[in-house]
Image: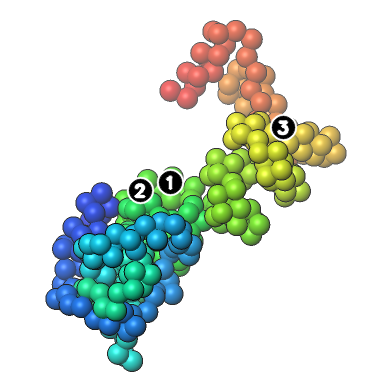
Amino acid sequence: MSNLLGEKKRLGRGLEALMKTEYSENVQTDMKIDIDKIIPNPNQPRKEFDLSALEELAASIKEKGIIQPILVEKENDGRYRIIAGERRYRAAKMAGLTAIPVVFGTFTPREKLEIALIENIQRKDLTPIEEANAYNALMAEEDLSQDELAKIVGKNRSTVANSLRLLKLSPEMQNALAQGHLTAGHARALLSVDAEENREKLFDRIIGNQISVREAEKIAADMNENNCGKKSKNIEKSSDLIQIEQKLKKLLKTKVSIKGTEEKGKLIISYRSNDELQNFISNFE
């Protein structure tokens, strides 16, 4: 696929439109082949398939057949690897079909992952963890930056970055998020907690008490506040931080206090009136 990163790709056009443009030179004519010769894609971003949704799709396929062919690539052993359309393939097997329509293609590893990712994102089939893992795999496979990945999948860089941050959660937390026991909002609250011990405590409270995202965010902030307070009580402020405080006081013309260390802490800027506040803001305009 030529000049992928030089163009601004957008998923809103739909997978079919993308197949007619970016991947059109790779796609060949479609035909029906024996369903037993088709095998799933081990790099399929989606790992969980809702049984009831598959049963509904199988019922529709029984009545109307498969409207959109499955995209496959021929293996050396004569079988056909699914690139896009695994839900339709699974539902077709449930419906008892012996042969299904396919479109042949030849793709690079990167293109295979892109197509599978695009299809799942458009249909909103991926859990937050599955999407994060798919982004991470694509970045690792092709040595992409977050900016480059964001262009490929048609999302803001911040959206991609927030998705990838979910992989910093513990396996137990990731599993809870994948199973729907934890929302993305809860996950963000957990990620905001500095101390691992406190993060585990908050996770237990979210699962056990089913607290709201807003409550979780407040608890996270309180935990960080208390944790920072404990650290600052036990750590004497370094001479470097004292000098930085003095410089900021002169620059901002107001009271400035630093709590913490050179690595982590809080910068507190005080003001006594609206005029003083506006004077402070003017320093950054």
On the question of residue 188 being in view, the answer is no
Q: Who's the residue at 64% across and 31% down the image? A: 215
| Quarter of the image with the N terminus in it | bottom left
Q: Amino acid at mark 2?
A: Lys
Q: Residues within 10 Å of mark 2 (few under 14, many from 20)?
A: some
User: Helix, strand, or loop for circle 2?
Assistant: loop
| Quarter of the image with the C terminus in it | top left
Pick whichever, 230 or 280, lies toward us.
230
User: Helix, strand, or loop for circle 1?
Assistant: helix
Q: Who's the residue at 43% across and 71% down the image? A: 43
Pick whichever, 243 or 85, lies toward us.
85
Specify the quadrant of the image occupied by residue 89: bottom left
Q: Which residue is mark 2?
A: 155
Pick whichever, 38 or 174, lies toward us.
38
Q: Which residue is mark 3?
A: 222
Pick whichever, 36 or 109, lies toward us.
36
The answer to whether 203 is drawn above or below residue 98 in the figure is above
| Mark 3 or mark 2: whose residue is earlier in sequence | 2
**Along the horizontal axis of the image, is 93 left or right of 276?**
left
Q: Position of residue 131 (x, y in %)?
A: 45, 56
On the question of residue 14 being in view, the answer is yes
State the scheme by which the image is colored.
rainbow
The answer to whether 222 is drawn above or below residue 30 in the figure is above
Q: Which residue is mark 1?
A: 159
Q: Position of residue 254 (x, y in %)?
A: 63, 17
State how far apart marks 2 and 1 are (Cα). 6 Å
Q: Amino acid at mark 1?
A: Thr
**Along the horizontal axis of the image, is 178 left or right of 203?**
left
Q: Amino acid at mark 3?
A: Asp
Q: Are marks 2 and 1 in contact (CB under 8 Å)?
A: yes
State how far apart marks 3 and 2 are (Cα). 32 Å
State how far apart marks 3 and 1 are (Cα). 26 Å
